[in-house]
């Protein structure tokens, strides 16, 4: 096949029904997500709506997990709405009012049946695929556009956005910004005047859906700075900057976000670039190559949360260099139309990725970025697999690189998407089983203390399940330690005991530092009230508690008290030892299996 002769696959991609076929594939891949049901944060948000979770925010602000004020935070800690080690001024306040309103409406319509919620998510995802397809058809040749849409639709990173109800905000924001971008392209390239207003409107509505709309705005900025000029417009950087002036509207969004006290503070996993620029830069230096490795080579970024980060960083840098070399090798055969599109789509994808680096790391963050990466992969596959000489590397090496890219993003990605959807469903059932099988008893209003459980699926989320399925069963739920080691529990009095992690300290795991940044140590002797108990930090090592004293305010044998620990796949009761005696609580992996 010569460099200018389309192959069989390209002819298939140019078929009039190619886009309909991709939409059908997207539907077939997304439909099994209905088996996931409610999953982790879904229960927490539904508990907020039912007002059965401590400190439930109003219906229009469901993603306000920690308001940031010392008084409100202390009240949440005492009611066990936040862990006892939470920073006194922790702020985890996201503000997607459209997503909150959508979930409120879904609860009114569908109640406690998850099927309807999932059908809404699938419909949003299919609408996004259609909108992205229209974008690709506008800026890319037919075969490349169809392949780019296929790569976007089967991307394994999308299992969480369309499969996790709590992530509907990502779909809302991305869909709205893509529609706004399409309107702006029509205005810029064809003079369609309504697009001058519909474009910014799409971004604005997207920002009400989620902060992820900033990723969509990144494409808008990239197009204004590097995209083709509209006929009749003055060219040059000064003119392009003038055309980008509507983006200044984003400043109004940031001002409003500050006015409602949105953002994050005093957390190691959520970092606000506006209030903590230095900490954000440090986190971004780690997270950007990790997420690039996920986007370019399917290296699972989620594992970097609990595993050493250096291998993931190196994998991301290597993948980026390899893709850059492959692009250079394919450059002579890339069409002018494709180059013009990639000139703003790829920088837009990278900028979109940068806007997500302050969030909890994971593949779900790549949804906006994949709008720009999918066309890049499509161009490299279409041009890289063709025979013909290359001035930068051998034809065999170029074709081998493109073939490897195809194996990853055409063959492996949909398999991983299916596996990821199934894994979400299995994990959801495990969390529900952890709540159902917890040795709590039937008495209502019990105070539950989890002495040792390192996995948040065992330590935190069973409580959310109780809040939705058995709202009166528990009065509070206190998680005492998430250290990934065995613990010694020594009874010091009728109502008190000490809890000591063996050969470790508390606040070393990633899920613990969600609530308290590593740079904010706890002091020895510090006391915290929670769930009617007094928790005192009695020993520290490098600012992290190595022993805590707990007084439950009632004898450990009180029937209203439940002392649990995660052992052998179950939250089991801990039999109170005699005063002065010690029991060992061995560590075992939780539902996540980590």
Image: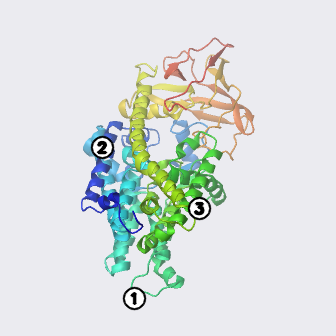
Check disc 1 and report the residue beneath it. 232
As measured in the structure, the alpha-carbon distance from the residue carrying label 2 to the one carrying label 3 is 39 Å
Name the image quarter holding the N terminus: bottom left
User: Is mark 2 in CB contact (under 8 Å) with mark 3?
Assistant: no
Q: Image height check: is 267 above or below 395? A: above
Q: Is 479 on the left or on the right of 500, as rendered?
A: left
- Element marked by disc 2: helix
- The x, y position of residue 105, in whole percent, is 29, 49
Check disc 2 and report the residue beneath it. 31
Name the image quarter holding the C terminus: top right
Foreground tag (1 vs 3): 1
Check disc 3 and report the residue beneath it. 274
- The x, y position of residue 502, in whole percent, is 69, 25
- Element marked by disc 1: loop
- The x, y position of residue 64, in whole percent, is 47, 49
Circle nearer the N terminus (2, 3): 2
Q: Can residue 206 be seen in this view?
A: yes
Foreground tag (2 vs 3): 2
Q: Is 39 on the left or on the right of 512, as rendered?
A: left
**Residue shown at 32% from the left, 53% from the top:** 124
Q: Which residue lies furthest to the top in this view?
A: 578
Q: Image height check: is 93 above or below 481? A: below
As measured in the structure, the alpha-carbon distance from the residue carrying label 2 to the one carrying label 1 is 47 Å
Which quarter of the picture shows residue 483?
Answer: top right
**Residue shown at 51% from the left, 55% from the top:** 401
Camera-side residue of 158 and 449? 158
Which quarter of the picture shows residue 498?
Answer: top right
């Amino acid at each position: 096949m010569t460099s200018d002769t389309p192959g069989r696959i390209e002819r298939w991609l140019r078929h009039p029904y190619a886009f309909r076929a991709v939409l059908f594939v997207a539907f077939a891949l997304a439909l099994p997500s209905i088996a996931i049901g409610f999953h982790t944060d879904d229960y927490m948000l539904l508990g907020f709506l039912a007002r059965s979770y401590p400190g439930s925010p109003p219906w229009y602000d469901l993603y306000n997990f920690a308001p940031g004020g010392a008084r409100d935070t202390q009240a949440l800690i005492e009611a066990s709405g936040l862990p006892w080690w939470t920073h006194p001024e922790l702020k985890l306040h996201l503000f997607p009012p459209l997503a909150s309103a959508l979930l409120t409406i879904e609860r009114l319509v569908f109640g406690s049946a998850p099927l309807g919620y999932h059908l809404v998510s699938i419909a949003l995802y299919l609408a996004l695929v259609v909108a992205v397809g229209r974008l690709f058809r506008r800026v890319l040749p037919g075969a490349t556009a169809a392949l780019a849409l296929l790569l976007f639709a089967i991307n394994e990173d999308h299992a969480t956005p369309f499969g996790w109800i709590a992530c509907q905000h990502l779909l809302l924001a991305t869909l709205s910004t893509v529609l706004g971008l399409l309107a702006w392209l029509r205005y810029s390239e064809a003079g369609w005047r309504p697009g001058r207003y519909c474009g910014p409107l799409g971004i604005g509505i997207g920002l009400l859906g989620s902060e992820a709309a900033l990723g969509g705005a990144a494409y808008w900025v990239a197009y204004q700075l590097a995209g083709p000029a509209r006929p009749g417009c003055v060219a040059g950087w000064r003119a392009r900057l003038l055309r980008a002036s509507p983006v200044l509207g984003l400043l109004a969004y940031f001002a409003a976000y500050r006015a409602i006290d949105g953002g994050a503070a005093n957390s190691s996993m959520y970092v606000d670039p506006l209030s903590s620029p230095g900490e954000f830069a440090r986190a971004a230096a780690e997270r950007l190559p990790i997420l690039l490795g996920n986007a370019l080579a399917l290296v699972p970024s989620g594992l970097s949360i609990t595993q050493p980060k250096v291998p993931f960083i190196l994998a991301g840098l290597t993948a980026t260099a390899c893709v850059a070399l492959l692009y250079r090798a394919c450059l002579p055969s890339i069409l002018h139309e494709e180059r013009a599109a990639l000139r703003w789509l790829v920088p837009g994808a990278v900028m979109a990725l940068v806007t997500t680096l302050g969030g909890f790391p994971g593949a779900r963050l790549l949804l906006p970025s994949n709008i720009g990466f999918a066309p890049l992969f499509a161009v490299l596959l279409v041009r890289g697999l063709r025979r013909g000489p290359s001035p930068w590397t051998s034809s065999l090496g170029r074709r081998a690189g493109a073939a490897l890219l195809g194996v990853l993003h055409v063959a492996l990605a949909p398999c991983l998407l299916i596996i990821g959807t199934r894994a979400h469903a299995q994990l959801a059932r495990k969390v529900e089983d952890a709540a159902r099988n917890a040795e709590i008893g039937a008495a209502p209003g019990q105070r539950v203390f989890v002495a040792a459980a390192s996995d948040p699926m065992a330590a935190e989320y069973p409580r959310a399940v109780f809040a939705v399925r058995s709202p009166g069963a528990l009065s509070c739920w206190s998680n005492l330690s998430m250290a990934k080691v065995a613990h010694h529990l020594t009874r010091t009095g009728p109502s008190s005991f000490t809890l000591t992690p063996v050969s470790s300290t508390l606040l070393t795991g990633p899920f613990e530092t969600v609530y308290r940044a590593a740079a904010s140590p706890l002091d020895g002797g510090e006391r915290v009230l929670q769930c009617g108990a007094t928790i005192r930090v009695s020993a520290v090592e490098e600012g992290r508690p190595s022993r805590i004293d707990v007084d439950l305010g009632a004898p450990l044998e009180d029937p209203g008290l439940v002392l649990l620990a995660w052992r052998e796949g179950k939250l089991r009761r801990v039999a109170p030892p005699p005063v002065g005696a010690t029991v060992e609580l061995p560590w075992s992996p939780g539902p996540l299996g980590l």
